[in-house]
Amino acid sequence: MSQTILSLKDVSIYQDSNLVLADINLDVHKGDFIYFIGKTGSGKSSFLKILYADIPLREGTGTIVDYDLNTLQEKDIPFLRRKIGVVFQDFKLLPDRTVKDNLLFVLKATGWTDKEAINGKIEEVLEKVGMANYASKMPHQLSGGEQQRVGIARALLNDPELILADEPTGNLDPQTSIEVMEVLKSINQNGKTIIMATHDYALLLKYPYKTLKFEDGKVYEVVQKTV
């Protein structure tokens, strides 16, 4: 039986008192790759914020990586977030420190203390994204695609069960977007579950995976045309 990573039943999502999305039912299983598509303002980001507990679930029931979103306590949120890796559109690297020190910052913040284990983990995740030779570089010395690879490496540090990628190719040119997608694809093929919000329909055609469309306050599956 496949392991359920995320399960939502009759969920409605609010931003303050405004209803953003209604009647969401979704099950995501280990190893899935799912796209979220829809116009800006259609609720994709609000949906992702529910998943990493940035906004509370007020209506419906939900579990994610074995945490109940209805009964989640404030003190549990850091532990939930260790089981979820987030990749951002704007990279969010600390500009005043090297690639290695960016990753070191996250590991120390999440409780790692063993120097050997820390160095081993940093080498491992940089290797996975093809950035093993860039550990001593500063972010401004990297291209956008290279910065995003480091962003993906950072998301992998605590061996998350789920990766949320919020427009990860939004600031990249088409060729670089493909390079980043190849990294995400290989991570998915190694068993990681990925949910990716995107506007890039060219990528959906080149890398067809299950696609959920956000429109008019609803979420529904799109059957992709295969060429």
Image (cartoon, helix red, strand yellow):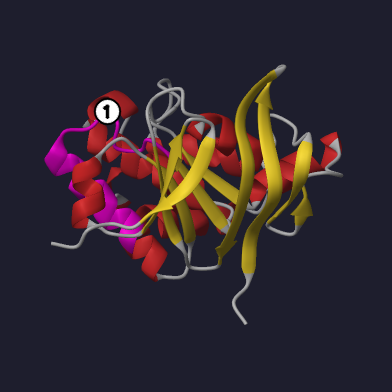
| Picture quarter with the C terminus | bottom left
Identify which residue, 100 or 202, lies in the foreground. Answer: 202
* Residue displayed at 46% across by 55% down: 194
Residue hosting label 1: 171
Front position in the image: 209 or 162: 209
**At which x and y percent is residue 22?**
63, 36
- Residue 137 position, x and y percent, is 30, 34
Check the image and name the residue furthest to the top: 17
**Relative side of 76 to 117, left or right:** right
Residue 17 lies within the magenta run: no
- Name the residue nearer the viewer: 216 or 175: 216
Classify the position of the N terminus by image quarter.
Answer: bottom right
Q: Quadrant of residue 4?
A: bottom right
Residue at 37 percent across and 28 percent down: it is 39
The secondary structure that most of the magenta stretch takes on is: helix
State whether residue 152 is above or below residue 209: above
Residue 101 in view of the camera: no
Q: Is residue 12 left or right of residue 69?
A: left
Dot 1: few (<14), some (14–19), or many (≥20) neighbours within 10 Å?
Answer: some
Mark 1: which amino acid?
Answer: Asn
Q: Hey, which quadrant is residue 89 in on the image?
A: top left
The region drawn magenta spans: 166-185
- Residue located at (19% from left, 62% from top): 226
Magenta-colored stretch includes residue 167: yes
Element type at mark 1:
loop
**Residue 181 seen by the camera:** yes
Q: Going by the image, does 143 lie left or right of 2? A: left
* Above or below, 102 relative to 223: above
Q: Position of residue 177 (x, y in %)?
A: 22, 42
